[in-house]
Amino acid sequence: MPVDSVNNSIYLDSIKYGQTNKGQILGKDDFLLLLVTQMQYQDPLSPMDNTEYVAQLAQFSELETMQNISLAYAKSQAMSLVGKIVSVQVSNSEEAVGKVDMVTFDGADIYVTMGDLTFKIDQIKRVFESFDFETENLEVTGDSK
């Protein structure tokens, strides 16, 4: 496998890790709901120690910070795609190749725009660091999702 392929794989994986799968990962609201429920149903004769609450809140704070760092890193990596040629999976049998003109964000979702087509970042299959074709003659094809 060429080094270029390995670098692209690592690069794209790092971008994808910054995104969350809504409904599949517990967030801060879920954690707080769990903590409140735990407080409601604790044994009044043997209540939870204050240090346990502080420890849980510290863990929650650390988790939230790590999620924010991960998302910021993913956005930074995505911004570095502007001006690069990428291959995007449009459907099972169709790919689009084009120059990334713009990167946009919608919460944790990251989108790339090539010409008048917009794709989710996880549809990118390859980033071309060096290419053998003229970008002026490059035609973006395919449908965005």
Image (cartoon, rainbow, N blue to C red):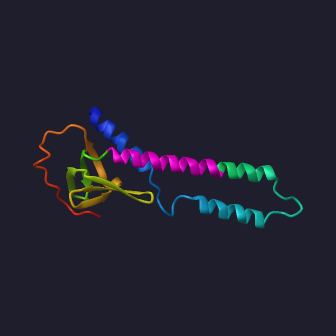
Which of the two residues, 97 or 9, is positioned nearer the viewer here? 97
Q: How many marks?
A: 0
Which of the two residues, 13 or 92, is positioned nearer the viewer here? 13
Q: Quadrant of the N terminus?
A: top left
Query: Going by the image, does 26 lie left or right of 84?
Result: right
Image x and y of residue 101, in percent: 25, 52
Q: Is 108 drawn above or below residue 76 in the view shown?
A: below
Q: Does the stretch in magenta take in 35?
A: no
Give the residues in magenta.
60-80
Image x and y of residue 49, in percent: 82, 53
The residue sitting at the right extreme is: 45
Query: Going by the image, does 60 lie left or right of 12?
Result: right
Q: Residue at 81% across / 56% down in the picture?
A: 48
Image x and y of residue 76, in percent: 40, 45
Q: Quadrant of the C terminus?
A: bottom left
Q: Residue at 24% across / 50% down in the picture?
A: 87
Kindly tell me whether residue 91 is visible in this rendering. Answer: no
